[in-house]
């Protein structure tokens, strides 16, 4: 760990008539993790900075695909820095020269994260300042690399568009669009993924000592955005049922985005070691499976190839959402999707509980076929599942 860096926010840029208690208006502190012996170039043109203030579920897409590709093509030989959330250094140690970790005291700014970008005004102010250090690659670049469609016609003049090495170019007005994104051909994209490094044997041995027998991971979403948090009573009941079924429940998530832990449950977020993401991954790698509802903590099990169950809105898989693509791009093992609308599930928690226990039993028996829980239009979704 090197000497931390500090950035003063521009009050004009971040100021607001209505003060947001989840925002921050002071000095940003970054803890610097140095991974290489290279000397930092003095010329900004020799440096590249990847801004990773994404939601956890989206962060893994550029981590596995965009950043490695850019470092092997556009930014070969550049001094690379990733800037992101506290506790994430393990994700970037095999990719960049340095990781600038936002100080733990500022982690409440995660509530401002939306997909690939952050709505935090002070973090946006920081991005404007950091251009003096090097070329900035941020949320717009990550989103384009993932979502840009295959273009048939130019949006400007409606002429045909041809696919070329550096982009999609209009034959008439020469307007250039980004190359087709990862979502346009997921099966092809997965073959290019650069997965995380192997977990150290020391971390795995420690995880074995910490875990109870027959462990099952459970994430109780407690975020402030999107309004998809189930009540604590539901999780208490689920813990009781899973314990009666012979599992030892492990409560795992980052501090500040999880609900209070039911009595008698191992709360990994309370351990000092939970700040080490490699240690968390070691723990998850030894679990029987993990269970989550409307949250992308599935990325942890997906990173280490452990089976997981996720309850998700069908629109995220078959409609306008992106989670279906992200699950395929970021999961190294098998998983089971249970389709449910949150607005319906919250009104029928008994059915939700029953279906969760069914899903756990099926995954235990290697049945990963998706099914429908509490939702509207179940027959239509069943047809879409069969086609998928």
Image: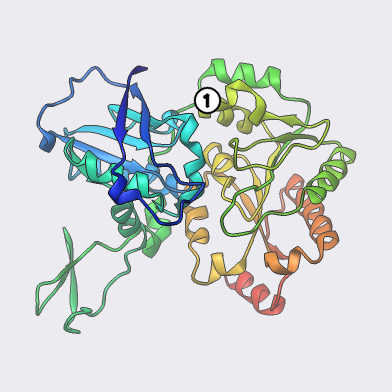
Q: Which residue is labeled 1 in the image? A: 276
Is any part of residue 152 visible from this angle?
yes
Left or right relative to 362: residue 16:
left
Q: Is residue 59 above or below residue 44?
A: below
Residue 197 occupies quadrant: top left
Percent coordinates x, y for residue 142 in the rendering: 33, 52
Is any part of residue 68 visible from this angle?
no
| In-front residue for pair 371/49 | 49
Percent coordinates x, y for residue 240 in the rendering: 87, 42
Left or right relative to 137: residue 30:
right
User: Which residue lies most toward the front here?
Assistant: 17
* Label 1 Cα neighbours within 10 Å, binned few <14 / some 14-19 / many ≥20: some
Left or right relative to 1: residue 213:
right
Percent coordinates x, y for residue 44 in the rendering: 13, 35
Percent coordinates x, y for residue 176 in the rendering: 16, 67
Left or right relative to 255: residue 350:
right
User: What residue is rendered at 45% in x and 46% in y?
Assistant: 23
| In-front residue for pair 3/35 | 3
**Quarter of the N terminus within the rendering:** top left
């Amino acid at each position: 760990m090197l000497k931390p860096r500090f950035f003063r926010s521009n009050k004009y840029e971040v100021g607001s008539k209505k003060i947001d208690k989840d925002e921050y208006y002071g000095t940003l502190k970054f803890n610097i993790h140095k991974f290489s012996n290279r000397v930092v170039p003095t010329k900004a043109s020799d440096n590249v900075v990847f801004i990773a203030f994404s939601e956890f579920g989206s962060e893994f897409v550029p981590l596995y695909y965009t950043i490695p590709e850019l470092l092997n093509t556009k930014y070969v030989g550049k001094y690379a820095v990733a800037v992101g959330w506290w506790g994430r250094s393990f994700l970037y140690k095999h990719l960049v020269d340095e990781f600038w970790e936002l100080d733990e005291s500022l982690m409440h700014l995660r509530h401002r994260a939306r997909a690939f970008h952050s709505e935090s005004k002070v973090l946006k102010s920081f991005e404007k300042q950091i251009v003096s250090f090097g070329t900035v690659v941020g949320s717009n670049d990550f989103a384009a690399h993932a979502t840009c469609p295959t273009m048939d016609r130019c949006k400007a003049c409606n002429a045909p568009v041809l696919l070329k090495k550096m982009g999609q170019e209009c034959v008439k007005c020469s307007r250039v669009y980004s190359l087709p994104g990862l979502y346009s051909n997921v099966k092809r994209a997965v073959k290019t993924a650069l997965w995380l490094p192997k977990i150290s044997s020391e971390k795995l041995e420690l995880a074995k000592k910490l875990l109870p027998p027959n462990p099952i991971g459970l994430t109780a979403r407690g975020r402030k955005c999107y309004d998809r948090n189930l009540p604590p009573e539901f999780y208490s009941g689920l813990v009781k049922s899973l314990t009666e079924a012979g599992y030892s429940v492990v409560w795992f998530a980052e501090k500040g985005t999880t609900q209070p832990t039911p009595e008698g449950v191992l709360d990994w977020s309370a351990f000092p070691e939970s700040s080490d993401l490699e240690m968390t991954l070691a723990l998850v790698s030894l679990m029987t499976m993990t269970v989550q509802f409307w949250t992308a903590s599935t990325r942890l099990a997906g990173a280490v190839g452990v089976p997981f169950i996720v309850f998700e809105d069908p629109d995220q898989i078959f409609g306008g959402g992106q989670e279906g693509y992200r699950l395929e791009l970021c999961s190294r093992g098998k998983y089971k999707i249970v389709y449910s609308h949150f607005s319906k599930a919250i009104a029928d928690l008994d059915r939700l509980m029953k279906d969760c226990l069914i899903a756990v039993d099926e995954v235990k028996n290697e049945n990963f076929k998706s099914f429908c829980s509490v939702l509207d239009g179940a027959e239509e979704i069943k047809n879409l599942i069969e086609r998928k």
